[in-house]
Image (cartoon, rainbow, N blue to C red):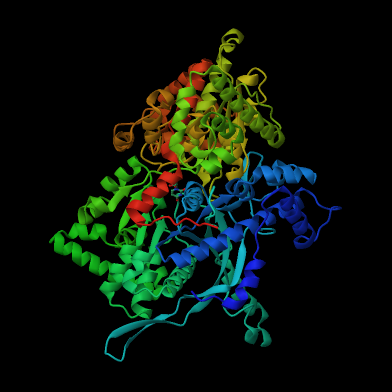
Amino acid sequence: VEASIPEPLREAWRKYSAVGFTNKEEFEKELVRHVETTLARSLYNCDDFSAYGGTALAFRDRLIIDWNKTQQRQTFADQKRVYYLSLEFLMGRALDNAMLNVGMKDVARDGLKDLGFCVEDVIDQEHDAALGNGGLGRLAACFLDSLATLNYPAWGYGLRYRYGIFKQEIVNGYQVEVPDYWLDFNPWEFPRHDVTVDVQFYGWVRKYQDENGKTCYSWQDGELVQAVAYDVPIPGYGTKSTNNLRLWSSKAASGEFDFQKFNAGEYESAVADQQRADTISAVLYPNDNLDRGKELRLKQQYFWCAASLYDIVRRFKKTKHSWKDFPDQVAIQLNDTHPTLAIVELQRILIDQEGLEWDEAWNIVTHTFGYTNHTVLPEALEKWSVPLFQNLLPRHLQIIYDINLFFLQSVEKKFPNDRDLLTRVSIIEESHPKMVRMAYLAIIGSHKVNGVAELHSDLLRTTLFKDFVTVYGADKFMNVTNGVTPRRWLHQANPRLSDLIASRLGGYHWLTDLTLLEKLESFVEDKAFRDEWAEVKTANKLRLAKHIKNTTGYSVNPKALFDIQVKRIHEYKRQQLNIFGVIHRYLTIKSLSPEERKKLVPRVSIIGGKAAPGYWMAKSIIHLINSVASVVNKDEEVGDLLKVIFVEDYNVSKAELICPASDISEHISTAGTEGSGTSNMKFVLNGGLIIGTCDGANIEITREIGEQNIFLFGNLAEDVEDLRHRHFYGGFKLDPDLAKVFDTIRSGVFGDPSEFNALISSITEHGDYYLVSDDFHSYITTHSIVDEAFQNKDEWIVKSITSVARMGFFSTDRVINEYAESIWNAEPLVVKD
Ligand code: CJB
């Protein structure tokens, strides 16, 4: 590798190489220097926000020094790199994470104290990096943490949205979306104005013969948009390895704007070109588990895939390996179908630009990619209309047709005369207009396809991708059950519990080998330990109660059972089941005598999450929750027995506050609909028990922690289809308790009942697709069992400790090692000083 500084001068360079702070005094010096110079403030006007800035910049310096070392080491090592392509990285805040991963939070705390600041208040100044919708984006962020911690040479590639997921405000009980402009001050990114890629759109395809008479294709004209790289350092925990997340930002390829147009007086059109380019990376699509097929979204996808592939190929070419080695140097993981165009783009680069033959190129492509599916919901499966494709990416459409042709020919050869099979597995759906099925393209272009929990992967194999199992055999389709990073979701979110565990396990080594938590089981009989465990939970509930008081004005009793459901609002996740259950509880309380009420367990029902802006049913669920809250919370007869709280603007940093504070959390999707779920893991890891359906990873959580430690209810996935069928053909019978709930809503107790008509009729008149009525009885009965169990405090704590002890399986460290071994064939690379 060539160095820009010649050997005789390197000595001087090395002498002055940046080192970063290593102790409290140096940290303070760096902090003050950054506040006074980088931020141009002084001790006369340094507020919490400036102290955050100074602290973040001091830590950023440390990260970037390690980042440089890591990148150099990886370049010299010449081994396989992993590239994780994700349209979403829901990172949350970076400072606390950097402090803990570098092992310098105590230094920062003491240093900040010397200078008049409190570390928690400083951490609280940071704006969340919210470049994602929900589980899929947060999983990508947990993966980055584990990849760096385990020393894998890995890069994330994504888009640098100017606006992340919207900020949610609740106005008169309704969700209102407010733009999330988060880039005012972002010390965690490094603009690389020298790392740019021109990305082409539209245009036409020229067919020609080269000098050897070979038929070639070239994509001509159209429009160019420039991608500019912004790098975000990703520190591993307890290691020097600091990986890179590269986010692309779009701008007009011709610089600021077209000066020829400008000089000719066409000001508006000159600026419009600039704005059109800017728009590509302007905003994250706020849909979770839903595909809307908009052109701008396809533009985002291609822009990001093209820039990332160009970058990966450029890096590969520097190694001087031959093309056949590409899959030994590069593994690309597709996070859902959003980056599927990368498959087509690599094939295009290899055949149109590098002159490889089709088969040779396709062999390289299919050995490079792996595809992860995250959902079986039909409305989430991406399809793009052929005319849209033809216009925006004409050469890619041709290549897709060729991929499809060769694929169908191979299927025909293996299964002659099965025309139905050919129609079913074709990448092109024969509808009007024709559609490109992205999941099929992803399967055909990858060497491995995986689901995210056992049940989900089984459903993929037996339903959605059944025909592809027939075509390829079962080995191509595997399961890698999701996890969460214990650094953020225990150590950072719940310092009290982390310290308590460390006090018994003799340090924090379990943070990088989560199975070591099993040693906690030997302490369940220890009364002192159980008491301390319970105190931690109470302290975390108080912390949340304080937030609830500050943000909603409601006081909640920290001794009550905290029952929490936080996740995107979606009919399949069934927050409606939760709020109907809450209404049922309210009716029960009202029907009891004051004496009988004394026997009840007080409860706080906490629900939070965003609805996609165009998803009316989800929005009316939010409205109902808030309407119920405003009635119940004011009802003096009910008092502490029931409080209903809607947490506004649920995001990663709120999750860190909320997950440690549950007694019980709800993971109650209709069986067979949730891919995995990951908040289920976060809550259990923080000592909360869960009520859930036999869905997603709940099933494996049960297997690990034991049936006696979880409250399962509801119909099984295998019975769902039959039940749905019966709703239409065998008559629909509404659960009698649910009928009472509906009568109460209709009576107007919770405000204008017409607002909730659609919600009710989706169950009573339109087939109850999500089986709310079928599961209602089992749901409320199980909640009574929860109440009863909660009264036996000691047994509850034993369940809590035992569950945490058995959660080792759900670390993303285990997940990443599985991907590395069975999909990427990648090895770690340790970075030393
Ligand atoms: N998921 O967050 C999303 N968005 C989608 O569009 C599709 C799936 C979620 O991915 C998570 C990570 O794999 C899963 O845990 C979750 O069940 C799934 O809904």
Quadrant in the rendering for residue 252:
bottom right
Q: In the rendered view, would you say 705 is above or below 264?
A: above
761 or 159: which is nearer to us? 159
For this view, does 816 lie left or right of residue 118? left
Q: In the rendered view, would you say 527 is above or below 382?
A: above
Horizontal and vertical percent position of residue 585? 53, 22
Viewer can see residue 483: yes
Q: Residue furthest right?
A: 44
At x 68%, y 45%, the residue is: 107
Q: Residue furthest top?
A: 595
Viewer can see residue 607: no
For this view, does 24 lie left or right of residue 487? right
816 or 676: which is nearer to us? 816
Instruction: Please give the count of numbered marks on the rendered protein.
Output: 0
**Which quadrant is the C terminus positioned in?**
bottom right
Horizontal and vertical percent position of residue 113? 76, 42
Q: In the rendered view, would you say 491 is above or below 7?
A: above
At x 46%, y 23%, the residue is: 522
At x 61%, y 41%, the residue is: 654
739 or 224: which is nearer to us? 224
Q: Residue furthest left?
A: 416
Q: Residue furthest bottom?
A: 211
Q: In the rendered view, would you say 638 is above or below 302?
A: above
414 or 609: which is nearer to us? 414
For this view, does 625 lie left or right of residue 154? right
Horizontal and vertical percent position of residue 125? 70, 48
Horizontal and vertical percent position of residue 5? 59, 76
